[in-house]
């Protein structure tokens, strides 16, 4: 491959990568792939790749002579056709094929987390001591839950599966939800075990540290009418009462459902 | 309901694969841009002037360079490739390469945060200390090997070229040197991306298709938990800045197994095997992988005996 061809092919490769990175950011598709902390670096990388791609073309004349003086010691950009194909084909195929979500098969392979002990350490939302009327700190004072718990139009607390999972093991957090009406969105997973009456299923969300590749499925239990069924991984909205019964020697999060309906996936597909 | 141990789904694989690529590219790009600047603006042999002359001290200082120049495991390979071409000894480069993803402030902070309530300070010190020790030991081992048995032929040639062209870009105008730095960076980027893509693909197959619960029974035995967690680190190929958050959640595994996971993973995983192959001979990469696995495994099993 001539120096000119390899420079053009390198520019084209970077152009494709740059476009894809920028496209993911601008289209919002990146939300389903990366933790928000990584959105800006990925976007900047896309812009830089586009800039380099253009610069490679415009600086061909500048570097032509220096490459000629380079005694052939530096290999051309991007290697041969096979290397170019490897740099582009898997990426383009993945962009085309990926649906921005996992199937039930991968979720089961990852293993569903039902105990917050298997999640990163949680800091309970206990505020620093607030000044009392006298100006002195009040020991053990907590923030009013209504200040940080959002409610829907019907007065149901809008909760995440991970909130209730942590609530099962954190007494302070449990008090915020226990026996209160909640609205929780998640993906339907049928119970594999521990469902003798056939009236339970799991409500699952993906908990992410960096990217979808490290996502961990976290799920709570929903108690519904026997025979409640949806296709696996369907997004459902559950309205009901949050309870934390002791089963198997520990508190578990169970929603006693009053209404379950299929719903659109939320804007944020992950829990963080 | 019995689940097969292997169930491949192309959309799931594509999803995981793409997310690894999107996450990794910024760091590889940063590393390769740095490598281009090193190529043009760092005079040859300057590193050797700053590092101690004694091989042992040089390796130890190199293993601590991550505290000043933190790099993640994806971005560091192009950097050390240029540093080697600029005269940094291979033993020092290997020590820096293995230690920097662990012995750096970002990893220290993330480890501390992830292990809150689980002896965070002790765990962080142990992780960084063991990472430093293993990297220094590997550097010393590499010092005793011939450079030809470690580096790929093209890298050896670049070392010779670097020695011949001691001044980098020399007296060329700044604009031309910047363009040359970009060219060098792009070459490195495309080279490393080739290997990164293969590694990310391999890790994504394991991350989506293999039933990971198969590993859980191993947690019950210390001497099985340690190697199985190292194998898991190799397969999952997580980023060193966040792997502690994943390790901390393996509550059924003993602390030493998590330590092994956190020291072995940033030094050697599926994607790194391929990325290292951009610089090192395959035989060396294989030997390094086996050596690190055995050494970290033995140390961690030994630590379990003293009831860590």
Image: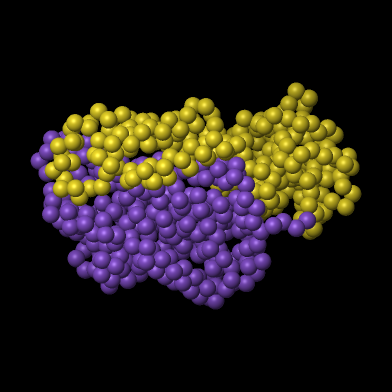
Chain colours: A yellow, B purple
Where, by quadrant of the figure, is residue B153 drawn?
Answer: bottom left
Q: Nearer the viewer, residue B236 or A6?
A: A6
Residue drawn 12% across and 38% down?
Answer: B172
Residue A232 visible in the snapshot: yes
Identify which residue is drawn at 24% across, 62% down: B89
Foreground of the two, A15 or B293: A15
Q: Residue furthest top?
A: A153
Q: Position of residue B18 (x, y in %)?
A: 51, 41
Q: Would you say A116 lies left or right of B105 here? A: right
User: Residue A64 sits in which quadrant?
Assistant: top left
Q: Quadrant of the C terminus of chain B?
A: bottom right
Residue displayed at 56% across by 52% down:
B205
- Give residue B245's position: percent from left, percent from top: 54, 51
- The residue under the point 78% across, 35% down is A238
Camera sees residue B62: no
Q: Is residue B8 above or below residue B281?
A: above
């Amino acid at each position: 491959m001539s120096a000119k061809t390899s420079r053009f092919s390198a520019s084209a490769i970077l152009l494709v990568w740059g476009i894809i990175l920028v496209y993911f950011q601008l289209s919002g598709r990146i939300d389903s792939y990366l933790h928000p902390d990584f959105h800006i670096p990925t976007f900047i990388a896309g812009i830089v790749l586009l800039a380099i791609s253009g610069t490679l073309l415009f600086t061909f004349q500048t570097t032509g002579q220096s490459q000629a003086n380079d005694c052939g010691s530096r290999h051309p950009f991007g290697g041969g056709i096979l290397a170019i194909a490897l740099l582009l084909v898997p990426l383009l195929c993945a962009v085309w094929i990926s649906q921005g979500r996992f199937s039930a098969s991968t979720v089961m392979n990852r293993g569903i987390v039902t105990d917050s002990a298997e999640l990163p350490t949680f800091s309970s939302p206990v505020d620093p001591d607030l000044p009392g009327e006298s100006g002195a700190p009040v020991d053990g004072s907590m923030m009013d839950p209504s200040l940080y718990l959002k409610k829907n139009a019907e007065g149901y607390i809008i909760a995440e599966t991970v909130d209730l999972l942590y609530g099962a093991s954190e007494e302070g957090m449990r008090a915020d939800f226990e026996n209160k009406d909640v609205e929780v969105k998640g993906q339907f997973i049928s119970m594999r075990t521990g469902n003798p009456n056939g009236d339970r299923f799991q409500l699952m969300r993906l908990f992410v540290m960096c990217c979808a590749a490290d996502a961990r499925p976290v799920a709570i239990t929903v108690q519904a009418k026997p025979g409640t069924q949806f296709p696996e991984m369907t997004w459902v909205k559950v309205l009901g009462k949050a309870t934390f019964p002791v089963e198997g020697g520990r508190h578990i999060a169970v929603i006693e459902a009053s209404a379950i309906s299929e719903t659109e996936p939320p804007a944020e597909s992950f829990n963080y | 309901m019995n689940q097969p141990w292997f169930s491949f789904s192309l959309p799931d694989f594509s999803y995981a694969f793409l997310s690894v690529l999107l996450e990794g590219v910024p760091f590889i790009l940063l590393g390769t841009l740095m490598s281009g600047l090193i190529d043009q603006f760092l005079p040859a042999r300057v590193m050797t002037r700053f590092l101690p002359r004694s091989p042992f001290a040089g390796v130890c200082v190199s293993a601590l360079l991550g505290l000043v120049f933190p790099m993640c495991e994806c971005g560091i390979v192009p950097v050390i490739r240029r540093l080697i071409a600029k005269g940094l000894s291979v033993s020092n480069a290997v020590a820096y390469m293995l230690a920097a993803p662990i012995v750096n402030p970002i990893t220290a902070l993330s480890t501390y945060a992830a292990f809150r309530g689980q002896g965070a300070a002790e765990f962080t010190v142990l992780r960084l200390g063991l990472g430093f020790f293993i990297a220094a030991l590997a550097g010393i081992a590499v010092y005793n090997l011939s450079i030809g048995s470690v580096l790929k032929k093209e890298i050896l040639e670049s070392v010779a070229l670097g020695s011949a062209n001691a001044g980098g870009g020399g007296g060329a105008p700044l604009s031309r040197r910047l363009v040359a730095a970009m060219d060098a960076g792009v070459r490195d980027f495309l080279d490393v991306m080739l290997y990164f893509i293969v590694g990310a693909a391999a890790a994504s197959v394991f991350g989506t298709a293999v039933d990971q619960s198969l590993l859980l029974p191993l947690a019950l035995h210390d001497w099985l938990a340690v190697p199985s967690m190292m194998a898991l680190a190799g397969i999952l190929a997580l980023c060193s800045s966040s792997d502690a958050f994943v390790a901390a959640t393996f509550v059924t595994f003993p602390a030493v197994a998590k330590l092994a996971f956190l020291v072995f993973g940033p030094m050697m995983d599926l994607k790194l095997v391929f990325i290292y192959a951009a610089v090192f001979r395959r035989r060396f990469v294989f030997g390094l992988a086996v050596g690190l696995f055995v050494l970290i495994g033995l140390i961690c099993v030994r630590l379990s005996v003293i009831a860590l």
